[in-house]
Amino acid sequence: MRVLLIEDDQAFASAFTNALQDLEPSIDCLHAWSREGAVAALGSSEYDTILCDLSIPSTDGALDEDVIHGISVYQQARKLHPGTQILILTGHSEEQIDFVTTAIQEAPREDLFGMRRPMALTRLIRKVNLDDCILSLVEFARAQQQMDDTIEIQERGIALTSAERRLLRIFAQRHNGAIIDVLPLSGGLSQSKTLRVQVQDSGLVTRAVAVAKLGSLESVTDEETRYRKHIAPLLGVGSFTSFSDEIRAGAGSVAGLFYTLAEEYQTSFFDVLARSERDALLVLDRLVELERPWTSSWASKQIRVEDLRRSMISDDQFIPYADSVRALIPLDQVERCRVTVRQCPQHGDLHGLNILVSGENRPVLIDYGDVGIWCACYDMIVLELSLLFHPTSVAVRGDWPSVEQAARWNDLDVYVADCPFPEFVRRCRANAIRLAAARRDVFANAYSFAVRQLKYPNTDKNLALAVARCAARELLRT
Ligand SMILES: Nc1ncnc2c1ncn2[C@@H]1O[C@H](COP(=O)(O)OP(=O)(O)OP(=O)(O)O)[C@@H](O)[C@H]1O
Ligand SMILES: [Mg+2]
């Protein structure tokens, strides 16, 4: 266990570390003496517990000790290490300022050891009660050690960080596990790690099987919020994988969401497309049905193309490519255009790997990081164009389309010539047109989505520019 002690009082610091070492030599205690030292230590490593004295100087050796320095360190620690317990150390009763009361009130309560016993992530420790503090740290270290000692992690084809191991042990502990078997699933395009995890108890009975998504607390919270708002309450049972658990704290800056494993859904939509266009059309029709709770409650509004494009690729990401786009497209004129759109919840990243398909050609949606309000035609456009831009799709579509065909994206007869699944493309497009407010809505989304592809290192930029140019030209014509 790693502890960071932020404390300028030498005598207290050495009494503290000596007592801690005597009781539990496995605890690794790092030390910062000032605000500056603490900020550096917080930025460079993970800790299991942070002890923060409030009255500290701004830099090592300075004589300006003040609670404002300790408060700013606390705030930084909470921000950088949202899943770590922080013990605020106070020496005098006058330090019982409003700040401490609020910090304690606002601190989340979390289950740090998988025992389903939540504890406050911020607590106040009086320096006069040093023994209590030491004992609580020792208990903490032993509880962590106990998890390490009793739960074996079987990493297959993946190297986990120590924080990720800790998080998976908390999950295993919640299911009385003795072994947790971990297999990578992630396509790896996003920041988070996706894993298949199976927990067995000491009798080798399987206690849990799940898909774990590990990432920052921010990304995990974001995905969970999207799920709770747009997926669970709106979509039909069986059309998404449900959320089974979450771990927000106890593993440094790593947090995790756990979903039920879609076991009968072994194939991706890209696999189906490669196998049979007939099956793919069946899945597509079911997808349209599956999304009906979303698409049937839309709202329309007028937006600028520029704003739509920004929702897919920010100005910062776009600027490096703006000149190459401008060489082909009257960029300013296109982006200035206003377009009436129909909006509703959408998956937001509906490429062929984010749709799993059962043996009976039933689709289930996974990966909810982009779920939110988009244009109602967006999923159909993403699904169609993921054939061109998703790295996995190249094997499925072969040489189709040429850049010349992509430049005629709107002329379907030309565009789908030699396509291995022409009817699929036509039906995606027909769906997009039906769901859109009018044609400009479709073109503005296709333009923005094609331009978005420029930011990815392994997309075919010529195809992206060709589609963007065609969509922009049609947009200006309508
Ligand atoms: N609930 C689930 N049941 C079965 N398999 C799943 C489940 N969730 C994810 N997978 C598998 O794991 C892969 C990666 O999952 P997911 O798409 O959620 O991760 P990701 O890293 O965000 O992927 P990307 O960014 O490439 O879209 C999926 O393509 C799928 O094969
Ligand atoms: Mg995915």
Image (spheres, helix red, strand yellow):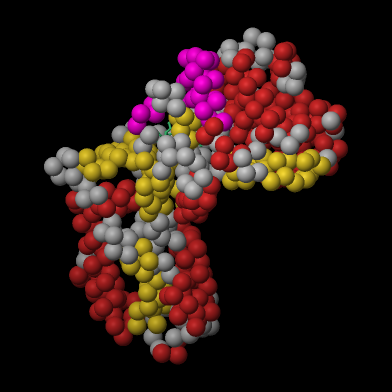
Query: Which residue is drawn at the image coordinates 48% and 85% (left, top)?
Result: 97
- Answer whether residue 287 is magenta in the image: yes
Q: In the rendering, at what x and y percent does residue 401 appear?
A: 66, 15
Examine the residues drawn in magenta and state their main secondary structure: helix
Residue 138 quadrant: bottom left
Query: Which residue is drawn at the image coordinates 73% and 13% (left, top)?
Result: 414
The answer to whether 390 is drawn above or below residue 422 in the figure is below
Residue 207 visible to an observer of this rendering: yes
Number of numbered discs: 0
Q: Where the C terminus falls, by quadrant?
A: top right
Q: In the rendering, at what x and y percent does residue 89 appear?
A: 38, 78
What is the magenta range? 263-288
Left or right, 60 with reference to 422: left
Residue 327 visible to an observer of this rendering: no
- Answer whether residue 242 is magenta in the image: no
Q: In the rendering, at what x and y percent does residue 453 appear?
A: 65, 32
Left or right, 402 with reference to 234: right
Query: Which residue is drawn at the image coordinates 76% and 34% (left, top)?
Result: 438
Q: In the rendering, at what x and y percent does residue 250 appear?
A: 35, 58
Residue 467 quadrant: top right
Q: Nearer the viewer, residue 118 or 147?
A: 118
The answer to whether 164 is drawn above or below residue 27 in the figure is above
Left or right, 411 with reference to 384: right
Q: Where the N terminus falls, by quadrant?
A: bottom left
Residue farthest top in this picture: 418
Query: Which residue is drawn at the image coordinates 49% and 48% (left, top)?
Result: 233
